[in-house]
Image (tube, rainbow, N blue to C red):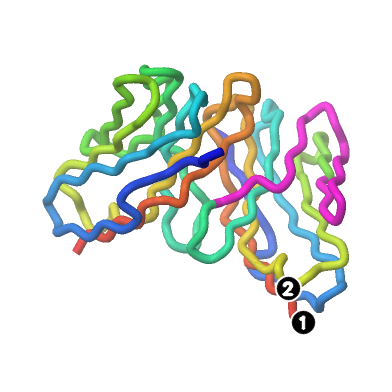
Amino acid sequence: GAGVSQTPSNKVTEKGKYVELRCDPISGHTALYWYRQSLGQGPEFLIYFQGTGAADDSGLPNDRFFAVRPEGSVSTLKIQRTERGDSAVYLCASSHRDSPYEQYFGPGTRLTVT
Amino acid sequence: GENVEQHPSTLSVQEGDSAVIKCTYSDSASNYFPWYKQELGKRPQLIIDIRSNVGEKKDQRIAVTLNKTAKHFSLHITETQPEDSAVYFCAATRESNQFYFGTGTSLTVIP
């Protein structure tokens, strides 16, 4: 079946602008995760959804970052007043309730803030 | 929180040789340890995992070992092939939602 998809694949924006990154999880996966991966580093946890609610948002770096999942499927990561330090690959992952530990990743969105 | 360290950061082996990547973790309550392979520009892909109630797990040429007492786990790849070349990440978690990743090992298999 289809895997996790993310759009756009690349996003270039100017410092101070607002961006939205979208994630489509695997159909039937109730859990959804956002990670940020900087160059040469492992993915860093941002936020986790179980259904529509954010069960754990402790990884969000500050209040410029926000994520929603209104219908329990697609999720949008929103970044306000972007800064150059936000440049990274933003990865989304999903998992099924029967195998909550097995996270399947999307291809990521490469965000570049100029 | 959990802290995962991974070594080495780069590793080159001759085709057919074995490769070993090691990770240590700090939270003794961590109970699940996956390994991901990430090819350049691609998504991380789960290749093998181990739970804390098991000491070793093997899947064809790949194996993972876990030492809970020492809080370290290792990935072993035997009979390496050029297509094994990628960046490998270990991770640890005690809850399914928050994975803590290592900094990655760039493996190059020389034909």
Where does residue A74 sit, x and y in percent of width and height? 35, 30
Is residue A83 rendered to the left or right of residue A52?
A: left
Chain name for mark 1? B
Residue that numbered label 2 is attached to: B82
Q: Residue furthest front?
A: A1
What amino acid does circle 2 point to? Pro
Which quadrant of the rendered structure holds the C terminus of chain B? bottom right
Residue that numbered label 1 is attached to: B111
What amino acid does circle 1 point to? Pro
Residues under numbered marks 2 and 1 in contact, where contact means CB atoms less than 8 Å apart: yes
Cα distance in 3D space between marks 2 and 1: 6 Å
Instruction: From this view, report whether residue B43 is shown above or below residue A49.
Output: below
Callout 2: SS: helix
Which quadrant of the rendered structure holds the N terminus of chain B? top right
Query: Can marks 2 and 1 be said to lie on one chain?
Result: yes
Q: Residue at x 56, y 38 (%)?
A: A1
Q: Which residues are magenta?
A: B44-64
Callout 1: SS: loop
**Label of residue B50 in the image:** none
Name the dominant secondary structure of the magenta segment.
strand
Q: Based on the picture, tell me whether residue B58 belongs to the magenta stretch.
A: yes
Where does residue B80 sit, x and y in percent of width and height? 81, 68
Of B41 and B104, which appears nearest the observer?
Answer: B41
Instruction: From this view, report whether residue A35 is shown above or below residue B9.
Output: above
Instruction: Report crowding for label 2: few under 14, some 14 to 19, many 20 or more residues within 10 A (C-alpha).
Output: some
Of A87 and A27, which appears nearest the observer?
Answer: A27
Where does residue B94 sit, x and y in percent of width and height? 63, 27
Splitting the image into 4 quarters, where does residue A85 fall?
bottom left
Instruction: Report crowding for label 1: few under 14, some 14 to 19, many 20 or more residues within 10 A (C-alpha).
Output: few
Where does residue A14 sit, x and y in percent of width and height? 14, 59
Q: Residue at x 30, y 51 (%)?
A: A8
The mark that comes first in sequence, 2 or 1, is 2
